[in-house]
Structures are given as C-alpha cells and as structure tokens.
Amino acid sequence: MLDPRRNAWMRPTLALVGVVGILTLAGCGGGSGAPNNPYVPPVTNPVLTVQPSSLTAYSGVPTTVTITSGQGPFQVFTNDATVLPVTQTIAGPSIVVLPNNVAVDTNVTLTVQDAFGATKPVAVSVRPNSILNALTFAPSGGDCGTGLCSGQTGTATVVASGAAGVPLVSRPIRFDIVSGPIGITTTNPATPVVQTLTIVTDSKGTATVGILAVAGASTQPAQLRATDVTSGQQQVANLTVVNNTVAGQSPLVVIPPIATITAAYNNACSTGFRINYYVYGGNPPYTVASSFPAGITLVNTTVARSGDFFEAITNGACVDPLVFTIADSAGKQTTASLINRPGTTPPPGPPVAPAFAVVPDAVAVPGCAGKTVTFLLTGGTPPYNAVVTSYASAVAPTLAPNVISADGGTFTVTFAATPPVVGSTIISVGDSSTPRKSGTATITCN
C-alpha cells in the first residue's frame, strides 16, 4: 500500500507527463488542425477577371477598366507607353487611362497582374479624337457688350475636325445648358426652348445653336457645354447674362421668326393648321397685328407674359408672306412671318367608275309564258333606269322595278301566262353618269 503523502506528491507529476504526451501526439499529426489533415480543403486563389476585355478609347478622353476579381495588390503594364501611359501600381479596382494623341487608329495591350502573378490582357484600340475648336458664343447685338442681354438671343458655335484638320461632316454634337438663365432655341413650336439639343455638323464641320436668355433675368454668369457624342470630348463656354429692361435696348424675340406651311396639292393652300409664336424679351404685355387679317385666324392678339404665345390658324388663303408685327408696352417692335403656299403635286382626279354591265346580258328561256327572269346591274353610276324596248309576245312583259337605286341591284322581267311566246325580248338599261353608260339584255324564248 502506497504512502498517502507520497501519492499526493506524484499527482502533479503524472498530469504534466500526460500533457507532454498529448502535445507529442499533436506534433505527429494526431491533432485535428494539423497541416496534413485530409479533411481540410486546399486554399484556392481567386481568379483574376477584368472588364471589359477589349475597348475603344479616344485620344484625350479618360477611359476606365475595372478589376472585378483577383487578389490585390494589382499592377498594370502597357506595351506602348507613348500611346497609352499607365501608373503601374493600382489603388483600388479601377484603372483610369488617358490615351495620348494619335494620327491613326493604334492597338495597345494593357496587362493586369494580381498578387499571385496571374495576368489578364486588355486590348485597347486608341483612335484619333475629334478636335473641337474652343466653343464660342456671340450675342445677336451689342447692347450688353460681349454679354447676353436678358431676353436676347445669341449663337454658340463649335468646329469638329479630325487628323490634319479635316472637317468632320455629319458629326453629332450635343449642346447642354450647364447653368444660368439661358436655353437653346429650336424650330419646334411645341418646344421652342430646350436645355439640351443634339445636331450634326455641316460640310465644314461646324455646329451652331441659338441661345436665348430669360427675359427679365438678373445679371449672373451662365455656362454651356458642347460634347462630341462619338468621342466624348467636351468644350465649355462661359458668358454673362445682363439684366436689361430699357425699352431702347431690351430686344424682342419671336420663335419661330418664320413658319412655312406647304399644302398637299397645287390647287389649294392649307386650312386649319395651327402655329404658335412665342414672344420673349422687351416689356410685356405685347400686342400682335397682322398685315393681312383675312389671311389667317389670329388668336391671343395680346400676349400677357414673356414666354407666352399667340396662335395663327390657316384658313385656306395663300399668303407668301403674311407679316405679324409684335410691339411691347414700351414701343419696341419686331416681326414674324407666315408662309402658306400650295404644293407642287396635282390633286387626284375623280374616281373612275367601274365598267357598267347587265348580268346576264343574254339568256334563253324555253316557253317563256308565265316565267320570270332576273338581271343584276354592276358598275357605272347608280341609279339605273330599265325599260323593255321590244318583245315577241302578244302582251308586253312586266319589268320591275324600272329604277334600280344601287350598284348590285336587280330587276325582273315577267311574261304573261298565255299565250306561248316565241322570239326575242330586249331590255335597255342606262346609268346616271355623263356621258351616260348603257347596256342591253336579251331574252330568247323558244
């Protein structure tokens, strides 16, 4: 039997030995967290993906490539730094590149690399950008110097050209109002002033829009922008709207300044066509007078506020032009015009009636006595008249009705019951056209 005191001394020692044994087993692979545990799944690196894998970029226009998966930090390399320079180290998932100017389309490859060395190529087609000359603005008059008087119009112009200064023809250019009390004028009476408008360049690569300042606007800066829709290149122009309500300076503007209506045919002018003329600037209210009052129906001869309209309704009178005089309360005047003219196409002629016919035009009837024959009328111009012009029977057959009112109508010929009939009976039918169309039907009795 062990000494109790000796047994108490050995318990801590045995516990320590047990712990050492457990650690030894763990070091030999016996622990659940050991590296060679077959139940622990292997680590998989995230796949490097980049969007888009190919793109078109224009010289001078920033373009973005986005890393959508992979292990950072990332790097990007270019095979032609003179065309498409890049910053090698990337902060975040976005790569913003700014191509340099090129004379012709140039292909460049970007290579994106993640922390594990995986790479993804991005094919970039760098194209020459349009060169937008500085967006220029000019007021329609010098009342406010280089600024735009309140209620006044002006023009904004930009020129698009390609390599070697070649004009870019039919190039879409979008004009936008960025800020300020101004708008872009249009030729659409329903929306005479808008905040954005896209037009195409002319044969010289020039795009021009009209700019209108709000009547009575306080003096303040304004800004408009021109964007080449194809490449995204932009130009911005700054101007000043000047408050100006002096009668001798504040201009009156009517939109549209002239409206032209052309009729469908060359023998008449339009009727019932409505045109709204919007009045801006000056000192409202405005009064409207017409140079040929009988040539149109004029609605709203007094326009109460700037931006309101008067309406002209055509009444068939041909005018080229009819002039409206618009005056404000301070005596300032301006004009607008209406042209209502015939077309160039002759009107269609009257409809041609289909050929007139009696169906059937001949029929043989054995022993006509007591029998009835029916005839159909088609074509020509109704109503029709039918009459028995000759008959072989002793008694004239009965024809009913004598007047057939409609195309596709019928009439009947009925013979007396006795005596027997032998020979031909002829019915004559005519329509109501000029000259009159006619036909006959023959009944042969045998």
Image (cartoon, rainbow, N blue to C red):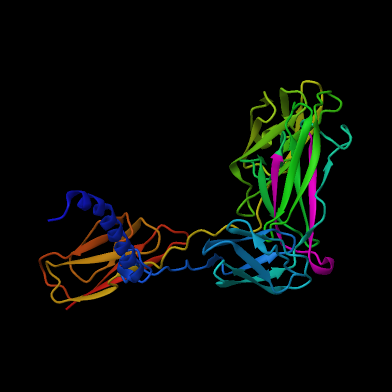
Residue 376 placement (x, y as % from top left): 27, 65
Is residue 37 among the parts visible in the rendering?
Answer: no
The residue range painted magenta reads: 152-178
Residue at 19% over, 69% down: 393
Q: Quadrant of residue 107?
A: bottom right
Q: Nearer the viewer, residue 421 or 42?
A: 42
Residue 164 placement (x, y as % from top left): 84, 69
Above or below for 300 versus 68: above
Which quadrant would the N terminus be assigned to in this image?
bottom left
Is residue 161 among the parts visible in the rendering?
Answer: yes
- 399 inside magenta stretch: no
Residue 234 placement (x, y as % from top left): 73, 53
Q: Quadrant of residue 391?
A: bottom left
Residue at 27% over, 75% down: 362
Q: Is residue 22 left or right of residue 155?
A: left
The outermost residue toward the left is 418
Above or below for 192 versus 167: above
Above or below for 300 versus 53: above
Residue 282 placement (x, y as % from top left): 78, 27
